Amino acid sequence: MRVSRLLGGVAAAALVASVLLAHSAAAAGANPTFKIANGRFERDGKPFRIMAGSIHYSRVVPELWADRLQRLRAMGLNAVEVYVFWNWHQAQPGPADFSTPSRQLAKFLQLAKEAGLVVMLRVGPYGCGEWNGGGFPWWLHTLEPPVQIRTYQSTYISAVEQWWAQLLPYLKNSGSLYENGGSVIMVQIENEFGSFGDVAGNPLDKQYMEYLVKTARQHLGDNIVLYTTDGGSVGYMSRGSLNGSAVYTVGDFGPGTDPHSSFAAQDQFNPPPMRGAHLCSEFYSGWLTHWGEHMANTSSSGLAKAMDTLFSLNASLSLYMGHGGTNFGRFAGANGGGSSFEPHITSYDYDAPLSEGGGHGYGSSGEDKYAAVQEVLLRWARKDGSPLPPPEAPAPAVASLGTVVMTGAAAVLPIGGGNAPNTNVFQVLCANQTTTAAGAPPPAFHTLGVSDGIMLALTKRPGPVNASGGLLDIGRPNDRAQVFVDGAFAGTVWRPSAAPVTCPAPPGPYIKNTMSVLVEDMGRLNYGKEMFDMKGFGPLAVPGASQPVLTLNGKAYEFTEPWVVCGMTLDDGLPEKIEFKPVQVGSPIAPWSYIQPAFFRGVLATPASGPVDTYIATYGWSKGYIWLNGVLLGRYWETKGPQHTLYVPASLLLPAGQGNELVFLEMERPNVTLMVSTVAAPDFSFGVRCSVEAAPAAGSAAVTWGVESAAESNQVWSVPAQGATGPIRLASDPSLCLQAGPEKDPSTGDPAAQLAACSAGEKAQQWTVAADGALLCEGSCLDITAHATAPGSAVETYACNGGDNQRWSAVTAAGGARIVSAMDGQALTACTAS
Ligand SMILES: *[C@@H]1O[C@H](CO)[C@@H](O)[C@H](O)[C@H]1NC(C)=O
Ligand SMILES: *[C@@H]1O[C@H](CO)[C@@H](O)[C@H](O)[C@H]1NC(C)=O
Ligand SMILES: *[C@@H]1O[C@H](CO)[C@@H](O)[C@H](O)[C@H]1NC(C)=O
Ligand SMILES: *[C@@H]1O[C@H](CO)[C@@H](O)[C@H](O)[C@H]1NC(C)=O
Ligand SMILES: *[C@@H]1O[C@H](CO)[C@@H](O)[C@H](O)[C@H]1NC(C)=O
Ligand SMILES: *[C@@H]1O[C@H](CO)[C@@H](O)[C@H](O)[C@H]1NC(C)=O
């Protein structure tokens, strides 16, 4: 068994001892009991303080379940809180999967027991947790009449019914409940319902919650403690919980909040004998992170102090998270609504005390968060006279496994014009092909029988062809669409902004006259009123939203030709369906200077000493997905950050010396050398590997940065007048000029914007200020790479296309002007390697 291999003999013996202790009630012949009585939790008749932490088995490979549970117990936890995500078990309607190793929930619950931990199980049906759709399966969208989630509506309730009629008996019959000798002491119904529905104000919402409670009781019996979790105030609890004895009402709040008011609120809903038992079921130990944000990083000492305060109030808590893990596959969700859409990164490290890779987490001042939490937990365990845990297992082995050069490639779209299929990939993609009625827009993913992934929509280019191109607005695809005209990239549409795409003017007579739109699902919303969003081209779940309107040059445009649409779920096993062709940099299949979605394949060798954990670095790549030995590790978005490495647990590698198949689906541009390195530690650094405050020199990069006084001496320039051509000098050092190249932009291979000693004869320093705000150098435009809006984004020169990322305005500042992007209001700033 994995755990005995990882633990030293001493630790293993201690683990056995603690398990025996935990089962003393059963050993003595008494039935194990857990209840809330006398205003406190009582386990086997004795007072019990819950010291829990969240861990999600769907975010940890099953080979490491025992390992992570052991480390949480060693940290001092006596309980774990666990979400059961519906879509993890029911990828399709019908029989739920509890047998694939990663879906063996009962085994996980048994391993928790063996580690000396009891379990608070959150069975939903909704789960939030930054998980795709909050756990709701995609196929709910296919049911008729249309599902209304999280209320008493017939279609929704019958879907819940057939899910719970499998889940709950499985829990009962597998002996997972505490009273049956298992680990589950409490079961949570719904989740933060008061942030979505209103039990007090809407009779159907009340009926829904009562239905869930009744159904849980029917299957799980009278003894199990049922609870609800809501925001930590009376308002949330009134909307989300059921006042009275049917459920135990709990609040959640972070270390920065005064717990007294939340506990007082709890007391207004929990009658005796529950009243007085206080619990915070999501005490935030870190925080979630979206693409384009700095990695969450919260204080370790602040957390420890707040835990201490809670314990001194005789309260119980559950850290959210104890161990975050990884959003493998396509299971990362998104936040958003209205004009906002914020997908979560692949790592779910969360800055939790136990890090994604199983080591210690570190907080904002570099303090060891695991050690800080452990000190508090063990001190209170001693005070409470609770059994102490065994020591932590030795740290997991982790190493760089060197560098891989990709040697095979397969383009997703036909190369070089037309829709002539690039045989194999196109065939895989188009297994479920649909043709729309002429004039109708392309559909949503679920109408193709495809859960999510990528969708390709092909049609004839909208006409009549305008000699100077045309501004095509394809509305608001959910979530990201890349538009190609005759195989050439025209632009990207991103859900919140949905800016129109400029279709380039035909370079010559249009022969194929085709348009391809590649839509990428970036994860379903997991929280908020607009949850339950469709993917592909369907309307958003916004009241009154309609199908997107397609316009060309501002006029409603009806495509006269139908769209041919196909969708592909990005899943484990996909790479084996793809026929890779040998590739080398510069070969005809690889026009790397253009955005060209393609699969790449290489081989990563397992060291002779055997598998160890590693991290795959995405340096120089742009955006896409990574498979290792057919397992989809998750999404990367190097040009956005902050995640630059994807975690690979050792169990995904083949035995010593063998070659592991590494496959990237790169949606934009690959690393120009087609290289991938592996590293021994995660990298969450925020894109900027240079300083905007240091004094610049020849060779410094020019990046985008917010307008800030601290960066002022590096972001004020002297700029030629509109229509004129000349150098762009740095105002604080007029001997330095903006130059295109000779460095290449790290992710594209195009000439990077940088500083160089001014030289009158240097063509790469001559800039023309065009009327539309473009800054041209040698016929190309100053361009923000990859349309990233994060500060520190790279700037290059690239074929002019009229995009917002190529339009700038000179905003007067002391001594010169700031060069401000029309895309995001950030300013061109000299940045010096630090
Ligand atoms: C819950 O019900 C009890 C008993 O009816 C009542 O005293 C209490 O005020 C209610 N709590 C809230 C928050 O309405
Ligand atoms: C905590 O519980 C102990 C023992 O029951 C009791 O003496 C003490 O007053 C309680 N403290 C608080 C703040 O409720
Ligand atoms: C948080 O910041 C500290 C100090 O820079 C660093 O040591 C730690 O690794 C960071 N934690 C995370 C999760 O990035
Ligand atoms: C095509 O649709 C069918 C049923 O709608 C589904 O079972 C199958 O997985 C889909 N195929 C692909 C490649 O997505
Ligand atoms: C041609 O396209 C340009 C934008 O690229 C637009 O300004 C112009 O109005 C279009 N002409 C016609 C006749 O649609
Ligand atoms: C390409 O990948 C290699 C290996 O990770 C890395 O050293 C190099 O810096 C990357 N190229 C760029 C331009 O980032």
Image: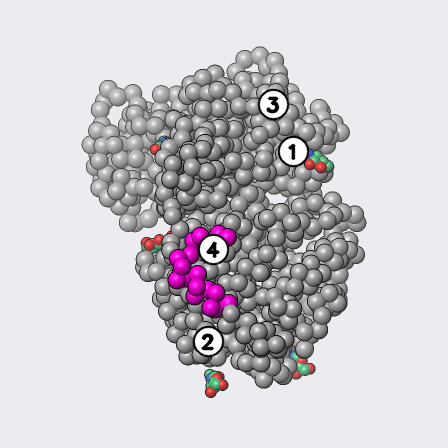
Residue kind at label 1, given as amino acid type? Gly
**Location of residue 616 with respect to 284 vertically, above or below:** above
2 or 3: mark nearer the eye: 2
User: Residue 115 at x, y = what percent?
Assistant: 50, 63
Q: Out of 276 and 235, give the one closest to the viewer.
A: 276
Residue kind at label 3, given as amino acid type? Asn
**Location of residue 124 with respect to 520 vertically, above or below:** below
Residue kind at label 4, given as amino acid type? Val
1 or 4: mark nearer the eye: 4
Q: Secondary structure at mark 4?
A: helix
Residue linked to disc 4 = 3
Residue linked to disc 3 = 424
* Distance CA(mark 4)–CA(mark 3): 43 Å
2 or 1: mark nearer the eye: 2
Q: Secondary structure at mark 1?
A: strand
The reply to whether the magenta stretch includes residue 7 is yes
Give yes or no for contact between labels 4 and 3 (Cβ–Cβ under 8 Å). no
Residue linked to disc 1 = 567
**Label 3 CA crowd tier, 10 Å (few <14, some 14–19, many 20+):** some
**First in sequence: mark 1 vs mark 3:** 3
User: Residue 51 at x, y = what percent?
Assistant: 49, 70
Residue 579 visible to an observer of this rendering: yes
**Label 4 CA crowd tier, 10 Å (few <14, some 14–19, many 20+):** some
* Distance CA(mark 2)–CA(mark 3): 61 Å
Residue linked to disc 2 = 386
Q: Secondary structure at mark 3?
A: helix
Q: Give the extent of the magenta segment.
A: 1-19
